[in-house]
Amino acid sequence: MIKGHGDDLYRHGPIRANFSSNVYNATERQGLLDHLHRRLDSIGSYPEPEPYSLEKGLADYHGIAADSISVTAGATEAIYLIAQAFRGSSSAVVAPTFSEYADACRLHGHRVDFISKPEEASSRYDMVWLCNPNNPTGRVWKASELYRIVRECPSTIFIVDQSYEYFSTAEVLDTKEAVSLPNLLLLHSLTKRFAIPGLRLGYLTAHASLTERIRACRMPWSVNALAIAAGEYLVQQGFPASVPLAELHAETERLRMAIGSIASYEVEPTDTHFMLVRCRHHSAAELKAVLADQYGLLIRDASNFEGLDAHCIRIATQTREQNDWLIDALRSISF
């Protein structure tokens, strides 16, 4: 899907606060920016055809073999490479969730079904795709349950997108344990954790038999020089704390309760820093337009997620001041 994602600032006038992307805009990244400034000359040369050095650094950080990791231009490239590597498979997608799983599968000839929870997965599917923590609900599936399901369906490959793992205190799947299982792939995003979506940087971890098949589909130089430099810096720094998580979670709960106290909105529980909200009296599209045009606030119209309807929006927590702007706007709007 090219259009319809969040962070569509290019379609609107001046925006003073962006709640539409799950990137936390107050992330501390000055050290990274300073490092990239010093590495700007790297754009004058080709990067490694495959980011071997960064893969080695990430493998050492996680305590796994380098052949169990593959760095990609964001988690989205990993999604499309996986779908390509297993072209023509039957895939189940746990919905509602990120649209690119189904889009990538359809592009590469998969038969796609939607299921509502991982427990509905069975060996009749070649692949099962899920997001954990899930986008757009923010909920986390229990790690013990996911391991049980993966082991009970050894002929099915499970792709678990953990792009938001850093933003939840709930237990997610462990990278070292996951690579020991021949039917489990984990996706990881540095884009989300360090608020660098413009660089496109992520990686997948899996049993070497899976990464070998996926690497065969990767085109050379897909990860640019500055993205590699950013990744190497972050690994060398030991993935520095970039977000005050306790404060972010407390602010998320404050924002969730405040919006939920407004009669026009129903807010679902979340295990991370973004939440799904249902509008009781108007559509998501109507609310998005009013907030953007009259208040300079951008939210995510979530109506195009499989299984959701025209009244669903997604909101990602930002700073306390920005969150107050949104709360005040929602209280003042009437349709």
Image (tube, rainbow, N blue to C red):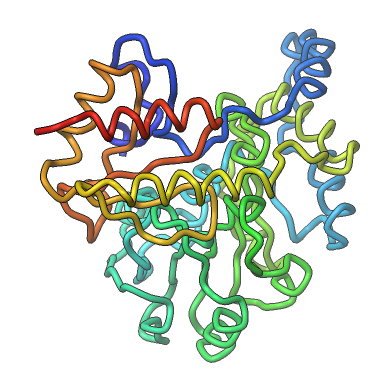
Residue 215 visible within the image: no
Quarter of the image with the N terminus in it:
top left
Residue drawn at 41 percent across, 60 percent down: 87
Q: Nearer the viewer, residue 133 or 81?
A: 133
Q: Find residue 230 and report its horizontal and vertical position in percent.
A: 76, 28
Q: Find residue 211 and report its horizontal and vertical position in percent.
A: 66, 60
Residue drawn at 83 percent across, 58 percent down: 62
Q: Is residue 43 left or right of residue 253?
A: right
Q: Nearer the viewer, residue 157 or 63?
A: 63
Quarter of the image with the C terminus in it:
top left
Residue 236 visible within the image: yes
7 is higher (above) or lower (below) than 306: above
Q: Is residue 21 left or right of residue 40?
A: left
144 is higher (above) or lower (below) than 298: below
103 is higher (above) or lower (below) than 41: below
Residue drawn at 31 percent across, 58 percent down: 109
Q: Find residue 120 and report its horizontal and vertical position in percent.
A: 36, 83
77 is higher (above) or lower (below) than 123: above
Residue drawn at 32 percent across, 33 percent down: 2
Q: Find residue 38 and report its horizontal and vertical position in percent.
A: 84, 11
Name which quarter of the figure residue 234 lies in.
top right
